[in-house]
Image: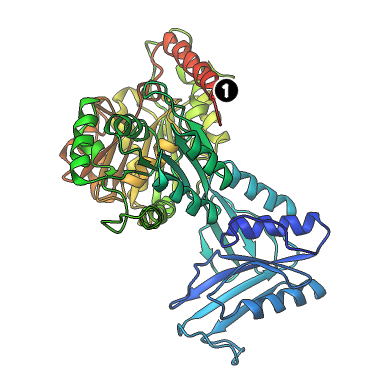
Amino acid sequence: MNAPAIPAQDSAEGALAAWLAYRRAGTPCALAVLIQAEGGGQREPGAMMAVAANGAAIGYLSGGCIDADVAAHAQASLQDGRARVLRYGQGSPFIDIRLPCGGALGVLITPRADEEAIEFVLSELSARRPVRMRLAHNGALGRAAASDEDGWNGERIVISLTPRLRVRIAGDGPDAIALARLCAALSLQTEVWSRSQTILAQALQAGVNGRTLTTPETLPNASDDPWTAFASFMHDVEWDAVLLDQALSGPAFFVGAVGSHRARDARVRALAERGRAAHQIARVRMPIGLLPGMRHANELAVSTLAEMVRDYQTIAKLPVRGTAFVLLAAGAGSRFSGGDKLLAQLAGKPVLAHAAARLAYFGFGAKLAVAPSGAAGRQTVLREHGWTVLENPSPQDGIGASIAQAMTVIDADPAIDRVLVHLGDMPLVSDAHLLALLYASQCDATAVMSACGPSFTPPAVFLREHFSQLRALSGDRGARPVFDEAARKHAVPLDPDSARDVDIIADVHAIEDTLRRRDRDENNTPRV
């Protein structure tokens, strides 16, 4: 049979999708996974290749050194039903296959991958959520447990997969469409915003969705996530300022605009007039592109995508396994007149459940929630969401004491190099914002807080050099003094709706209104 039409054939997602397509078509298919790469191998562990019974292969594990041999072993695996662990290069029995890099590659082949597990992995990636999978030496494949460490340990490999790069482009000319076509050729999810129906028609021809821009005051809602890069090719300071301002308000990891240094200065002034602080404006790549001075549309597209890919590789490798996620849920909520504020119903579940569900699909080094001793309702919600509960016998001592209690546990684990602190009464903080905080903590900042207008607020991230200060906290000021004293710090914008916490019953009603408005706006978003 012909190979199924599978996008992104160089990605693990593409290989898994190919395996599933062959399986559903009734064609036996094996899955080969790179489990070790020593020396200068081209691919990283976790690279995958689907091999059908007829020898057709989608995906690759090397620069061509071993793929044909792996495909042959995969076919043999399908015939005898046995998984295989292969080694190439140094220490390999295959002396006729040499690796020019001088290293070694390990490959695990399974002829009986679990269809349900692969469907789950693909559904998570399709929903733009990271996911982890586990493949044992005997070929058994399934979801990874939170306690499973990434990598190969001689018995199994655990692989963390992140959504692929998504690109959002704004522009009315050839440079915008050149980037759109390049992204489409690489099977990247891409969207073009334009005032020009001609550009939108050309984008559609290239297989790229488009959205019509009418006035700067009526922008479409952006669907950016932490794996989205935004580039403006508007060549119009007014439009650039509005579009860049919108992108800076969201979770996109990359925000850039084309133009000269003179245009850059004009955009800086325009963004400042819109209320953007200097550290926020500094996030915008101006002029855009890894290579300076590109004057042809195609060259500019290559330069721009190269810069995006470089930064995407950084965010795709967020230090989650070395991060302790702390959720503070010990506050008394004395001003809340309707019972326990964290157990009040919000959109069909307790307030606390919204915060407790954040980043549930990441394998953090530790997930610790601080709750009052004897608060059975809160502790039940937290444990149902996979949190280890630390009971605070004196919650009246304030948020600082709760942080210090968690830090005493965290500081004793040398594998933890940073802590992400979130509050249980902030239900609208998104996964995307929390990931943006972690990303900022990799960019030469040791302390990162959220910024709502001129105010700094949780959630926040602190690196290990601040652990002793956090462990010494007390009272109600929380970690703000640690942030203030940090020499290298950064703030990530958080919109006022998302920054709202629950203090009184009116806050619950206001948050419900926000959720309804967001649903309404999403349903009414026009598309081309």
Residue of label 1: 523
Which residue is located at x 31 percent, y 54 percent? 295
| Residue 218, picture quadrant | top left
Image coords of residue 348 (percent x, y): 59, 19
Image coords of residue 71 (percent x, y): 69, 75
Image coords of residue 463 (percent x, y): 29, 48
Q: Is residue 99 shown left or right of residue 176?
A: right
Residue nearer the viewer, 513 or 459: 513
Q: Amino acid at mark 1?
A: Asn
Q: Is residue 191 above or below residue 494?
A: below
Count of numbered badges drawn on the protein? 1
Residue nearer the viewer, 272 or 419: 272
Q: Is residue 446 shown left or right of residue 157?
A: left
Q: Furthest-front residue in view?
A: 198
Q: Quadrant of the N terminus?
A: bottom right
Which residue is located at x 36 percent, y 24 percent? 216
Q: Is residue 13 visible?
A: yes
Image coords of residue 109 (percent x, y): 67, 70
Task: Determine crowd level at label 1: few under 14, some 14-19, many 20+ residues with C-alpha closer than 10 A.
Answer: few
The local secondary structure at tag 1 comes to helix
Q: Is residue 63 above or below residue 437?
A: below
Q: Furthest-right residue in view?
A: 26
Which residue is located at x 69 percent, y 58 percent? 18
Q: Quadrant of the C terminus?
A: top right
Q: Is residue 481 visible?
A: no
Protein image colouring: rainbow
